[in-house]
Amino acid sequence: MNLDTLMPQYVRQFETYIPSPPDDELKRMFGIERLIRLNNNENPLGPPPAVAALLRSLDPALVPRYPSGDCFHLREKLAAQLGLTPKQLLFGNGANEVIAFVIKAFCEQGDNIVTADRTFAVYEWIARFSGLEARLAPLNDFGFDEEALLAQVDRRTKLVFICNPNNPTGSWWSRDRLISFLERLGPDHLVVLDEAYCEFMDQPDYPDGISLLSRFSNLIIFRTFSKMYGLAGLRIGYLAGVEQVVDSIRKTCIVYSVNSIAQVAALAAFGDQEFIRATRSMVREGQQMLAELCSTLQLPLLAGDCNFAMIRLPFSDTLAYRSLMQQGVMIRTMTAFRFPGWIRVSISTRDEMRLFCEALSRLVHSRTDRNPLARAYGVSGSMPHISAV
Ligand SMILES: Cc1ncc(COP(=O)(O)O)c(C=O)c1O
């Protein structure tokens, strides 16, 4: 068998994403008793109480049956609450799967997608291993840049992906800015507005993409239950659009990919305002702790309303990863995401943030005591504290 002739060149060239080992394996590898995961922007308060109660009382008779193939009850409930029809919603095994549905539905060889060069990487990855061109517009001041995006668009551009707020920089477009971009782009391309972190946003002019569907029929909104609702392990996300667009995407949707437990858990979680308030309050406190830490250590911090922040280090992010792991804290290195020397940290409980702050302080002091020049690098530039807006 010759895999080289069996496999398309664009798949052969694609570098496999290696997920991190499970906690027990990591603890063994790094010789640690406790591991704090601050690498995936999860919600440590999750799942919401109604979901926890439901999981404890689940009927095993659910398991031998296939789930509802189109998330029937969940679609009905969310549609009613979002002011949409059930046909305007489509669920997937996490928002990640929904990205694949959309790309498969609209793109063929020779087409391209446009997005930013430093955003959620899965848009680019799925396009590339599907043999499509992913055109990447540089960020401007850590945010999506309309001019750079529009400059990449041509007649073969099927989809433009806007991550709002952006993972990993936390930057976001206001309603006016988004509308102006949609007007300038025109109706000949579809725009995906990824709102995976929308429930964290607390700014009056942050747009609700769903409210714009009646005005822009080429808009597709992504949402997930993995972030605010703390259901990442159950894998459920969805998209919303006008019926005609969603009907088209349904053709490439894998039926039964959303399991029964994820469906009932999402039903129980959706709209739990008390849980959202508690999570936002935890995030505010955690962000404050990071701001104080970075001010003390004189490290540039990129932060917004979301449950993550980026910190620039005066040494390699890989080195930081290893050292923090040895202290039981896992962060995300950002070199592979085109931010060399930066780490991304998820916001967690006060206790876990305190442990992270202590671990990072120890690391920074040990490095800069050894190499005073490194400290100068750490404070260089004009951005000791950047607030992503
Ligand atoms: C911006 C963004 N979109 C989509 C996703 C995918 O979420 P899901 O867990 O629902 O697949 C993530 C996950 O990190 C994300 O950050």
Image (cartoon, helix red, strand yellow):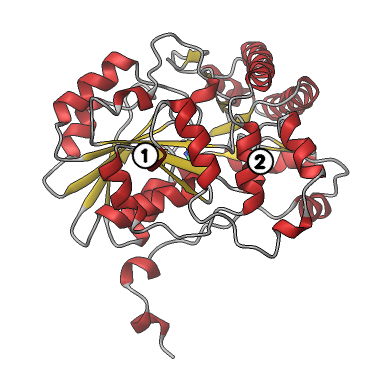
**How far across and how far down the image is residue 277, in percent?**
65, 16
Instruction: Give the image quarter of residue 116.
Output: top left
Which residue is drawn at the image coordinates 23% and 25% (left, top)? 215
Task: Name the mark on residue 265.
Answer: 2
- Name the residue tied to disc 1: 88
In terms of secondary structure, where does tag 1 sit? helix
Q: Position of residue 229 (x, y in %)?
A: 62, 32
Tell me which amino acid carries mark 2: Ala
What residue sits 66% from the left and 34% below the top?
268
Looking at the rendered structure, the kind of residue marked 1 is Gln
Could you tell me if residue 167 is visible in this image? Answer: no
Task: Tell me if the residue at label 2 has its CB under 8 Å from ligand 1.
Answer: no
Q: Residue at x 21, y 47 (%)?
A: 158
Outermost residue, right direction?
A: 33
Is residue 169 positioned above or below 102 on the image?
above
Say if 305 sits above or below 239 in the image.
Answer: above
How would you rate the neighbour count of disc 2 (Cα within 10 Å): few for under 14, some for 14-19, many for 20 or more?
many
Q: Quadrant of the N terminus?
A: bottom left
Give me the C-alpha separation between circle 1 and circle 2: 21 Å
| Relative side of 159 to 44, left or right | left
Q: Which one is in front, 139 or 156?
A: 156
Q: Is residue 188 left or right of residue 30?
A: left
Image quadrant occupied by the C terminus: top left
Give the mark count: 2
Chain-order first, disc 1 or disc 2: 1
